[in-house]
Amino acid sequence: MTSSNVSPSNRLTVERISVPPGPDADVSADFLAFHRMRVAHETALWGNADRAPTLAEDIMFWLGNEYEERHVYLARLGGTVVGSGTLTLPLSENTTTAGVDVLVDAGYRRRGFGTAILQHLEDTARARDRVSFDGYCGAPIEAGVPLVDAKSGSGGFPLDSDATGFALRHGYSLEQVESNSTLSLPPDGELLASLESGALTSAQGYSVIVWQDRCPDGLVEAFAALKSLMSTEVPIAGLVWEGEDWDSARVRQEEATWRSSGIDAIVAAARHDETGELAAYTVLIHRAEAPAVVYQEDTLVAPGHRGHRLGMLVKIANLRQAGVTWPDATWVMTWNASENRHMLAINIALGFKPSGLEGEWQKRLG
């Protein structure tokens, strides 16, 4: 693919690269270039690499699976790597959507290369009958900067961000903003005890179960049902996104991918004593290669069990277990839709502090 503002002798090309078959396989120079560019970008943006994937994570994620096809591209100017692009194509649900991401090396920006990469991704997605594209970008919180408002009606993203300008120029709208928050570890024990005492008064008739890495066989179908709800019962603003259908095989596939990526997971779930139903769950993950940070993944309370403070209860259980399992971790990072006031209130009560924003952008054809 050729960008219009470069000469034929110095042509920009955008080519798909192969992904190593696993973390123990030889890693090509192309994939290393892709990975290192991502780490450099996150480090420049945030001042550290805590939000960047490890090499093993990148390999296992971009291999894709039966539920989502994933492509990695490098952009070269002559023989020099100047940018990258990624494309995700859901295969089980959301088969008219595609996820796109564009990254241009800092020394080569504002020369049309990002546009060329994005055009290649969009053309590839269109050829697969995708008519809705979505992309995500992060930014630290800065006081007093002008914001572009999300169409969800809650939150905004920095207007002067390079990512904002790029998205708007190419027809993407800001559908939703997620708040990125962090909590120092270990948490305040007295605070947890006080919050737990209050939650237990509302959670009579429920028990908390905690497991690490692998869901017990007797709970995996019920856990899969909760994970299906996770894709329909959280705020998604105007994003075109269908619910995901989870079963035990899909749960096991995710667990296996995490293990191969060097990721450990802790899950705390609330079970309704009378029926045996799983009513709520929350997930924390940790990487030995980045021991300081723990990521907060899903948290969900099933609709029929809300109002019993189960979200608070399972989060407290998981935070306590994290201190035992990962004693070297120093903070937890989480993301919540800006309009998800209930979950944000739980996190604020636990001591989470705002640290960044994530913009969720969408472009629809027709």
Image (cartoon, rainbow, N blue to C red):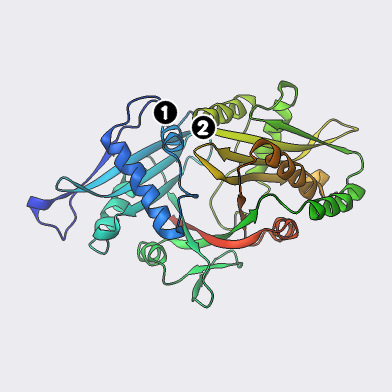
Q: Residue at x 50, y 49 (%)?
A: 50
Q: Is residue 43 left or right of residue 237?
A: left
Q: Is residue 249 left or right of residue 345?
A: left
Q: Is residue 298 left or right of residue 273?
A: left
Say which element carries label 1: loop
Q: Residue at x 59, y 63 (%)?
A: 152
Q: Residue furthest top?
A: 217
Amino acid on which disc 2 is placed: Gly
Asked if the residues shown at circle 1 and circle 2 are in contact, with their CB atoms under 8 angstroms apart, the answer is yes
Residue 316: % across, % down? 76, 46
Q: Nearer the viewer, residue 68 or 299?
A: 299
Residue 190: % across, % down? 82, 54
Label ID, residue 262: 2
Amino acid on which disc 1 is placed: Pro
Quadrant including the C terminus: bottom left
Label ID, residue 203: none
Q: Residue furthest left?
A: 9
* Residue holding disc 1: 23
Q: Nearer the viewer, residue 147 or 350?
A: 350
